[in-house]
Amino acid sequence: MRLGEKPKLIDENGRRIDGRLPDELRPIRMEVGVLKNADGSAYVEYGNTKVIVAVYGPREIHPKHLTLPDRAIIRCRYHMTSFSTTERKSPAPTRREIELSKVIREALEGVIFTELYPRTSIDIFIEVLQADGGTRTAGITAASLALADAGIPMKDLVAGVAVGKVDGVLVLDINEVEDEYSEVDLPVAMMPSFKEITLLQMNGVLTEDEFWEALKLAEKGIMKIYEVQRETLMSRYSKVRAEVEE
Amino acid sequence: MSITPTSGRIIPRLRRDTILSLLEKDTRLDGRKLNEYREIVVAPGVIPKSEGSALARIGSTTAIAGVKIGVGTPFPDTPNEGVLTVNVEFVPLASPTLEPGPPDENAIEIARVIDRCLREIRAIDLSKLVIIPGEKVYIIWLDIYILDHDGNVLDASMLAGMAALLDTRVPKVEIDEKKNVRIIRDETTPLPINHKVVTVSIAKIGNKLIVDPNLDEDDIVDAKITIGISDDGRIVGLQKAGPGVFTYDDLRLAIKYAKENSVKLLRALEEKKGTKISLNSVLKSYVEEKILKHQII
């Protein structure tokens, strides 16, 4: 949506529309174990982007013909609540949500040891509660936390962030306004310990050199997000441990 | 909801192992090198009733694209631009594994990747497709149908789509005093194109990267990356698919392969540009070629 005049996205001091420097993340908040019914759950905020994720499973699949004899299947739904956007979004799944459910599933599937749970399903439900840019990457970050909270073995956590190019400058963790007017949107997710890319999309035009620069910037953000993920899990489970030991 | 595919084609263990062991020797089941694309055929103008059309073949993978043009209202955020809509259909005649129904996540993903690769670089000059600013604009419907699925349908769809756009002629319109728009299909001008775009898909199997996977390879890939390349050599879109992962080194090699092969695809777009090929002749030459190669008798 490009309604009205394009605002100035980088000021004279090189600051962004919300005062951040180009390589700065928004304030990031995370919680795990926020839902009672789910086997694992997580809540993640990237600034005003707010995402909640529940993981159910490994559990039996209905219908049965979807089972795989040698591993678990992954079912993933990325969904935006109708009140998450400026204009009400119809709750029916859009083409965008169908595509993102697929790329998010694929970003997580290679990380989970699915062969440990044959004939079962691991279900990941992502609800975007408020959208302000970077919802799919926040969703992945939250989903990997929820999987960890469900006790599902994984090679690594997955953390994601989107890099954009606004007013010709590469910027980390774009918000909605930046996304609207950005020349490039490059969402990336990685297994931080291995520096392996599990999600990569690009909407926009870049030279190869710019692409590498953007990817490096994404990696920088991902390493910081990964730290917060680890701290969140550590503090949660050290509390659980203390309770158990009492 | 996106579900791990479980109802795909079953590839025999023996064939899978053969593919893997050949890859270790840097070769492939069909004799290609790792970075070698299959033979490409682009036939524009195959559907004269459409405003633009093309059939594209990559090996046996076949896609047909048609453009229809109508008049409608612009999106409120882009009042001074025409509208481009891309749709991809996997019809059941293309493969025994496909079933009728609305586009599934694979078809939607491909359509959206093609749309993004065309949109951001402004491959079509949508600003020249305005009839009454803010009120009436041309709507370009690009519909792509897969006819034969032998792997790498994304690149074939993009190629057919781009070729169809290059073949497209925009009908003139008449506007009366009540702002009613009438389309005159007999008088046309070429669709304004700024850039030609192609995609090159590279699959990762084990730790090997291969260009343009055929169906057998497509069925056992760990991950794929599709790279959109414009005629001026820029990257215009990226999409990673599949559960596997890519390292930085993989991406470096994939971009190199994509740039090399984009030249071949862009050349294929130029070869028959501006001509009208009969559908009969493309399909016939295809059958004859297959007989010559003893593929079917």
Image (cartoon, coloured by chain):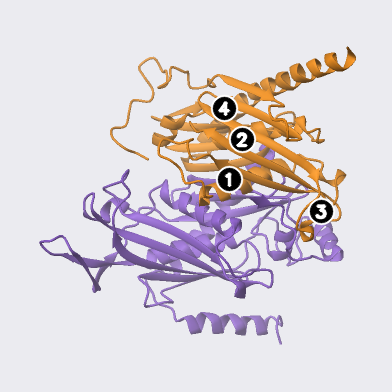
Chain colours: A orange, B purple
Residue B56 against residue B195 in the figure, above or below:
below
The residue where tag 3 is placed is B24
Q: Which amino acid does label 2 sit on?
A: Gly
Q: Residue at x 70, y 56 (%)?
A: B34
In the rendered image, residue A174, in percent from the top left (x then y), is placed at 49, 29
Q: Quadrant of the N terminus of chain A?
A: top left
Q: Which residue is drawn at 67% across and 23% down?
A: A31
The residue where tag 4 is placed is A217
Give the residue furthest to the bottom.
Answer: B297
Q: What residue type is labelled 1?
A: Leu
Label at residue A116: none
Q: Mark 4 lies on which chain?
A: A
Q: Do labels 4 and 2 share a chain?
A: yes
Label at residue A139: 2
Q: What element carries label 1?
A: helix
Q: Earlier in the sequence, mark 4 or mark 2?
A: 2
Q: What residue type is labelled 3?
A: Glu
In the rendered image, residue B59, in percent from the top left (x then y), is placed at 62, 69
Q: Quadrant of the C terminus of chain A?
A: top right
